[in-house]
Amino acid sequence: MLICACGGLADEIDAGTAPAPQPAAPPSAEQAAALSLAELRAAIHRLDGDDAPGHAFAQAQLLRVLALREGDGTLLVRARHAFDVAGRAEGEAGCRARLELARMEARDAWDVTRARAVATPIVHDFAQEPAVAACVAEARRLLTTLEALSTSAPHAQVADAVLEGVDVLGSEGSGGVRVVIRLSAAAEAERARSQGDGSERLDLSFATLTVPADQVTERHVAAGGLRDLSVAADGPGARVSLTLEPGAEVGVFALGEPARLVLDVAPRAAPTAAAGHGPPRLIVIDPGHGGDDWGARYEGMEEADLVLDIAMRVERSLAVLLPDTRVLLTRRYDHFISLPARTAMANALAADLFVSIHLNSADDDVTHGGVTTFVLDTGNERQALRLAARENGTRTSEVGDLSRLIAHLYRREQVAASRALAEQVQAATLHGARGSLPQLPDRGVQQAMFHVLVGARMPAVLVEASFLTEPLEGAQLRRPAYRQALADGIARGIARYAQQGGAAPLRRASTTAFARAARPSHTSAP
């Protein structure tokens, strides 16, 4: 919902919503709001590939609900497409679908210009159809509202933030959980940690935050150092409380576009083996993108498909190089996984290494491609910022803001170990790729603010294995032999790092900074 201080404009945007025609089988928008994340995804999957307008409308409603729960703008892109399909229907069904798309742009995507562009043709296209007069009247009222919003002073357009949802990710493992607080806009919170009877409590108090009735909750988690979670309204604000296991460690950082406050919880660190005692137990390989987030595209190829193929080849190579190590992929199919969920999976399972695989690209002609391996850092080098913005789906200015927000989470041990892993992966991947492209440039190990690496409690790197939009590299990426060479190189780099005893020290240092981050009793969280 679009929140503003414009004298009832938000109510006007929501006014007159009527249930739209849709098949009996898929859930309505109201029913969708009560579904679990797994049920939402299953319902969306059942409707995939069905372009019947009624089914498209139902899928759009489901996608919108899921997008708001996960704080995922990519799902809003899918919802927009589904509403477009539904809007091709004749009469009331088509009018309703296009009207809901306009409302979505205003309330969820916060894009008044796009909302006006969608709503304006409704009035013209259906003006001569008496059967849809009510829908057209609603479109006229919406346009009046949007016109007022577009001419209002910027400071009058947004009032207090609204709590859109709280997700717990990674609770299937014992290594830790990630709590994602989804907000309609950035909001400040004070943190206070206190001792209880056999437990500890962390309270986040928001001075001004609207909590819808359906977001007030008490949830039993019992995993990863987190016992219980509660969300409650507190006068004009809200309080999110975490009941923790004694000694549990918590890191807090903020992400933007959409606004999220993320809490990484880990149980008290247990004593660990000394350096060099055996190979890593678990390595998480993350094929970037997926689903409607296809990443880079070039001459019919999509980054999401190529990196999934490379990742599965890495898995097979590691089975030979590190037979005693378990390898887990964050996805095995062409479906979307949010950036916070990928790292949360690795944290929850207490993985020893995290390697995210991508392919580089550029909008302009590329004359010098190559291989790059990134570690997380607060550097602001322009090209690294631009690449991070593309992978994160944000503006470069937002990447810089994020850098400043999470600088306190750095751990010298983790940064050093990630760089050591990156150097091995970079060298081995480049060597493997040069078997096909002898002059392939070495772009080196660099630092950038990739969301997928934020909060990782193990050595974590992101590999841009080649430049998809460089003609020679793009041509090679079509060849299974080249993708195998890249995969073998990534796997060899991981194995060399592991065999040098690199994984064990991080098990000792994997969570210490999160305790430091949670130590202040009153801290402002952007």
Image (cartoon, grey):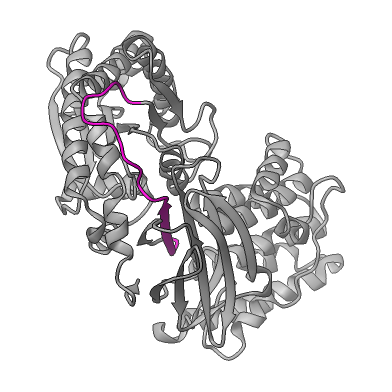
Give the residue at x 72% y 78%: 15
Which image quadrant for residue 107? Answer: bottom right
The magenta stretch is 258-280
Displayed quadrant of residue 108: bottom right
Instruction: Tell which of 338 and 506 is nearer to you.
Output: 506
Quadrant of the rendered structure where residue 130 is? bottom right
The residue positioned 30% from the left and 18% from the top of the image is 491
- Looking at the image, residue 447 sits to the left or right of residue 488; the answer is left
* Residue 75 shown in magenta: no
Q: Main secondary structure of the magenta part?
A: loop
Q: Position of residue 423 (x, y in %)?
A: 15, 29
**Is residue 6 shown left or right of residue 134?**
left
278 w.r.t. 218: above or below: above
Would residue 265 be counted in the magenta stretch?
A: yes
| Residue 432, placed above or below residue 157 | above
Quarter that holds the N terminus: bottom right
Q: Looking at the picture, does residue 179 appear above or below residue 412?
A: below
| 372 sits to left or right of 526 | left
Residue 429 place in picture, x, y as percent: 22, 20
Q: Is residue 220 visible?
A: yes
Give the camera-side residue of 216 and 509.
Answer: 509
Residue at image position (17%, 15%) is 431
**Which residue is rendered at x = 44% and y = 49% of the image?**
340
Quarter that holds the C terminus: bottom left
x then y, percent, for residue 160: 49, 81
x, y percent for residue 80: 59, 52
In the image, 460 versus 476, the foreground residue is 460
Residue that sits furthest to the front in the current view: 197
